[in-house]
Image: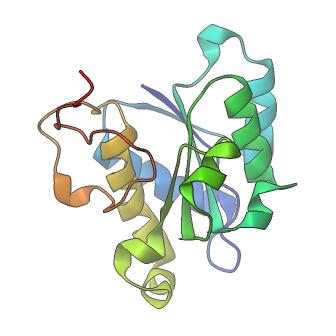
Amino acid sequence: MRVLIAPDAFRGTLTADEAATAIADGWSRGAAADELRRSPVGEAARTLETAGDDDLPDLVVTGEGSLEFRSLRDTAVAALAAAAMARSVPCVVVAGQVHVGPRVAFEAGIHGAYAAAADVGSVEASMADPAGTLTALAEGVAYHWGGRRGRTDVRPELLPPDPLVPGPRPGEDDPGD
């Protein structure tokens, strides 16, 4: 699976490059066989718009410190999600906090939004080690979204408790089949 990692800065805690490194580290632990490509968030949107179909990633992973309603308008993350949606590429967001619901996120082109603060129990705990909590969150999201999707050997304890995307988790049977 080809994964494009292009987060924005996590204001006050991580630069965009530090966030991309943390996400890539976690993703490589959660879905080691996935092919990861990192890109600045603004450049990634332009790349999606101009790439040939064979060059498109299978998934876009972006993020920022706090995914809010304002994040869905006139931000680099919003532009990237819109570009991914226009090319039918799923887009997930990993953030420090998530303040939008799944329907609103989906309408903006975001197929899943995951919060590091929720994963570790509090904003304070998340901010005490922002790179570490982002890496752990990315590992769990990779188990759900990465190339391992559908396999039965995943570790369910690493999955975020409530993914925003409906459907079976890896290793679960789809009742619609």
Q: Which residue is drawn at 37% across and 45% down?
A: 142
Q: Which residue is drawn at 62% across and 78% down?
A: 13
Please state which of residues 45 and 99 is positioned toward the viewer in this rendering.
99
Tell me residue 42's x, y (percent): 80, 44
Q: Residue at x 42, y 87 (%)?
A: 125
Query: In the image, is 133 to the left or to the right of 113?
Result: left
**Image quadrant of residue 74?**
bottom right
Residue situated furthest left in the rendering: 153
Tell me residue 111's x, y (percent): 54, 43
Q: Quadrant of the N terminus?
A: top left
Q: Quadrant of the C terminus?
A: top left
Tell me residue 149's x, y (percent): 29, 33
Q: Which residue is drawn at 75% across and 33% down?
A: 83
For residue 147, above or below residue 108: above
**Image quadrant of residue 32?**
top left
Query: In the image, is 29 to the left or to the right of 58?
Result: left
